[in-house]
């Protein structure tokens, strides 16, 4: 079945709502209510409980984890309105989407746009079912902000490429099954020598070393490719088209990272409430630390202006049928605020906000310490704040070398 | 920019075209040099276009287009620093819409909608806004007190006055003396002494009438400030693209590019807060909170943008010939109006019970 034509009639939507309700009643294990972990794909291998597995399989079979992707590749084939109804019904019963990760956020949409039919049929259905973990092979030791300087070589050996080189900051590389990778197929041209290649992480010659970070966690890895043989059919698009495809994928990444390090703040308590608990109120009903009170309220107001902006960007993009200009500021603004919040939390909690492990701390205090440190990555990865500023100045404001 | 309906888009385009072609920032320069509070012909044109009645119900001669619509117009006028009593008069009208009796509405709203009558709020009694506290008192329908730095006072025929026990209407006439107060923005401000001036209460608005009026004043002022932010930013960006030093246009310097990216970001965040404030008034949901947020963001952002506008222009930005200095001077006046950032932050924290 092809995608359903919009607009849906009210009767169609009502009957879809019934279908969604019935599906959720039958398949969503009530014990999983509200127990989603937004960061699990990046931060931990995440051992699946039987209930979690059952829920993932049910949603995957149905294609509803990727609700608007075409049905022929394993997606839900839903219209936007149906997808919104599904979201509403899921929220009502505390259900969450078990299908996620980089395959869904970044690779899937890119494959739908650039991949051949064979590649779509091979790679998209496992993403929809949540069976394959993907990681991103972009950055290298000498290709960070200057990504196009990447040196990992894919040498043409007739029916396959021979890949040699090193990637770094590979998020979740130690748990990944496959890697979408930018490689060099030619040294002749910096940008046009780059190609987009899908590599099996279990192939001989692939070695992954987790990098221990200041947070004590190892969400990123170094990935070494030594004479790794990759079949030619894993090249997406043409040779030399990698930079174009890779940049498009980054747009998907940025959209998803726009909340960035602020992600955690979405579901958490307002800072004023946290401060009331740790610092207390004076007789006048104000936080007992006057200066900190000002910092907190200033932060909360700027944070709310950011949330309003994220909503506006979505509404504008929807109305215009394309990405609105202000999407370009979301990553920069959201990650900065997320970091500010983490710093404020420490100020509010005092030394309880710096607990590393062991006795004497609540779990959320310990989590806060790690989140504070991990959050420093948010203004660096996915295009650092400085790169975002370059993009805004050049593309949006038109500030060029020659006017 | 919020997603607009056709009506709002038309209104915004009309205001944009008119301001650009008929009333650019040089029009304000002429008004100032002539020592006028505003250009009477321009005010006539605004009234002609229906702008004075945008938030007034149709039965009283307005168009009832709503606050987002009015905000769009005010933003455009803010871009050119258009001197007009539109903000003050719309706020006075909103006080009557919210708290007036049928007789009061019928008496004043049609004239306010047509621009024949200019209204203004007279709330604060000192140089800083310190909340809704007033020593002004009313006995037997006579109002006595002093109001400080009242906007658009010299041509106003109707004052909406905050007193100890509520909000009153006072018409220009007996018992009122107006003393001009010349501020750096060169606009029309005055101290007003009310001495047993005949006053009628706005009795229908409930206990929080003054707060509702204040909310609207904050949001509408923020809309004007948003327009000013945008204008300073656009002017500065143009300048950086033209000015050559070291054989390069200034816009090619990364130190300046990143500062402009920061200002752009702050302005967009502020735009969201201001538009949300206008939309909150239209929907009636959580208005005080949204209004406080809108004005605080507008305060901080305009403060920053007006300072940076001067610095990025260099010395030329400090000349009277360039407009960027006008915005700086107007900015500080509006930042103080209806609550400084510190006052607004305190108010917001109180709303959130800390």
Image (cartoon, coloured by chain):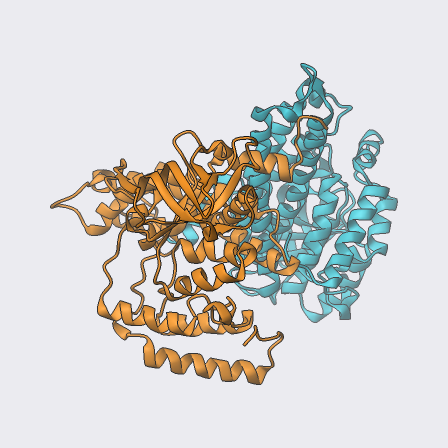
Please tell me which residue is depicted at 82% across the width and 58% down the height of the picture: B114
Quarter of the image where one finds residue B21: top right
Residue at the farthest top position: B246
How many numbered discs, if any?
A: 0
For this rendering, which residue is in front, A288 or A87? A87
Q: Is residue A204 left or right of residue B9?
A: left
Residue B260 point in image, percent of width and height: 60, 32
For this rendering, which residue is in front, A308 or A66? A66
Q: Is residue A322 left or right of residue B35?
A: left
- Tell me what hue chain B is rendered in: cyan
Q: Please tell me whether residue A147 is drawn above or below residue B67 in the rendered image.
A: above
Residue A71 point in image, percent of width and height: 50, 71
| Residue B164 in view of the camera | no
Residue at the farthest front position: A158
Q: Please tell me whether residue A105 is drawn above or below residue B26 in the rendered image.
A: below
- Tell me what hue chain A is rendered in: orange
Q: Is residue A146 left or right of residue A30?
A: right
| Residue A5 in view of the camera | yes
Quadrant of image for the C terminus of chain A: top right
For this rendering, which residue is in front, A331 or B100? A331
Quadrant of image for the N terminus of chain A: bottom right
Residue B262 point in image, percent of width and height: 55, 35
Please tell me which residue is depicted at 82% across the width and 47% down the height of the picture: B17
């Amino acid at each position: 079945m092809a995608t359903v034509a919009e607009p849906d009639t009210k009767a169609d939507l009502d009957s879809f709502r019934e279908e969604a309700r019935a599906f959720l009643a039958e398949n969503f294990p009530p014990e999983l209510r509200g127990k989603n972990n937004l960061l699990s794909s990046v931060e931990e291998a995440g051992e699946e409980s039987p209930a979690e597995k059952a829920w993932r399989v049910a949603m995957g079979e149905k294609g509803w984890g990727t609700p608007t992707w075409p049905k022929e590749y394993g997606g839900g084939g839903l219209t936007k309105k149906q997808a919104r109804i599904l979201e509403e019904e899921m929220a009502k019963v505390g259900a969450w989407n078990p299908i996620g990760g980089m395959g869904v956020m970044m690779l899937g949409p890119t494959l739908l746009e650039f991949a051949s039919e064979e590649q779509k049929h091979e790679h998209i259905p496992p993403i929809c079912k949540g069976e394959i973990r993907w990681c991103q092979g972009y950055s290298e030791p000498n290709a960070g902000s200057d990504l196009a300087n990447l040196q990992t070589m894919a040498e043409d050996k007739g029916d396959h490429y021979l890949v040699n080189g090193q990637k770094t900051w590979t998020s979740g590389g130690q748990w990944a099954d496959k890697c979408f990778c930018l490689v060099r197929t030619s040294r002749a041209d910096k940008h046009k020598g780059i190609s987009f290649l899908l590599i099996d992480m279990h192939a001989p010659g692939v070695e992954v070393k987790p990098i221990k970070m200041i947070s004590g966690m190892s969400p990123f890895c170094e990935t070494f490719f030594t004479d790794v043989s990759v079949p030619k059919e894993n090249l997406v698009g043409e040779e030399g088209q990698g930079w174009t495809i890779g940049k498009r994928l980054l747009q998907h990444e940025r959209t998803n990272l726009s909340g960035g390090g602020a992600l955690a703040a979405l579901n958490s308590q307002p800072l004023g409430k946290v401060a009331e608990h740790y610092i207390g109120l004076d007789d006048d009903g104000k936080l007992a630390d006057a200066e900190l009170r000002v910092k907190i309220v200033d932060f909360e107001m700027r944070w709310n202006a950011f949330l309003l902006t994220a909503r506006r960007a979505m509404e504008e993009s929807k109305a215009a049928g394309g990405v609105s200009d202000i999407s370009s500021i979301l990553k920069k603004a959201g990650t900065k605020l997320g970091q500010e919040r983490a710093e404020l939390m420490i100020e509010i909690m005092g030394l309880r906000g710096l607990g590393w492990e062991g006795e004497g701390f609540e779990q959320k205090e310990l989590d806060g310490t790690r989140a504070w440190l991990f959050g420093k990555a948010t203004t660096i990865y996915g295009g650092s704040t400085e790169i975002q500023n370059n993009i805004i100045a050049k593309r949006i404001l038109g500030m060029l070398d020659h006017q | 920019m919020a997603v607009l309906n056709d009506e709002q888009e038309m209104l915004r385009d009309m205001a944009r075209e008119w301001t650009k072609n008929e009333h650019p920032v040089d029009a304000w320069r002429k008004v100032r040099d002539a020592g006028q509070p505003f250009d009477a012909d321009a005010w006539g044109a605004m009234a002609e276009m229906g702008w004075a009645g945008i938030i007034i119900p149709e039965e009283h001669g307005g168009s009832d287009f709503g606050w987002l619509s009015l905000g769009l117009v005010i933003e455009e006028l803010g871009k050119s620093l258009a001197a007009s009593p539109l903000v003050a008069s719309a706020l006075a009208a909103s006080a009557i819409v919210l708290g007036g009796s049928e007789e009061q509405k019928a008496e004043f709203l049609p004239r306010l909608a047509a621009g024949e009558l200019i209204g203004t709020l007279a709330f604060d009694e000192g140089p800083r806004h310190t909340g809704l506290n007033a020593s002004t008192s009313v006995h037997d329908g006579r109002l006595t007190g002093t109001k400080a730095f009242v906007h658009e006072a010299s041509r106003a025929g109707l004052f909406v006055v905050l007193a100890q026990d509520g909000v009153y209407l006072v018409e220009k006439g007996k018992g009122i003396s107006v003393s001009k107060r010349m501020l750096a923005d060169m606009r029309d401000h005055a101290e007003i002494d009310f001495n047993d001036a005949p006053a009628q209460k706005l009795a229908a608005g409930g206990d929080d009438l003054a707060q509702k009026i204040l909310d609207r004043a904050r949001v509408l002022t923020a809309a004007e400030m948003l327009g000013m932010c945008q204008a300073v930013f656009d002017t500065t960006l143009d300048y950086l693209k033209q000015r050559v030093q070291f054989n390069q246009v200034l816009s090619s310097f990364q130190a300046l590019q990143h500062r402009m990216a920061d200002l752009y970001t702050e302005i967009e965040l502020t735009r969201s807060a201001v538009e949300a404030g206008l939309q909150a008034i239209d929907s009636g949901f959580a208005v005080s909170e949204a209004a406080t947020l809108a004005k605080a963001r507008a305060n901080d952002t305009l403060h920053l943008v007006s300072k940076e506008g001067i610095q990025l222009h260099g010395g030329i930005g400090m000349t009277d010939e360039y407009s960027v200095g006008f915005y700086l001077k107007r900015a500080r006046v509006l930042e103080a109006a209806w609550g400084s950032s510190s006052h607004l932050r305190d108010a917001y924290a109180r709303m959130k019970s800390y």
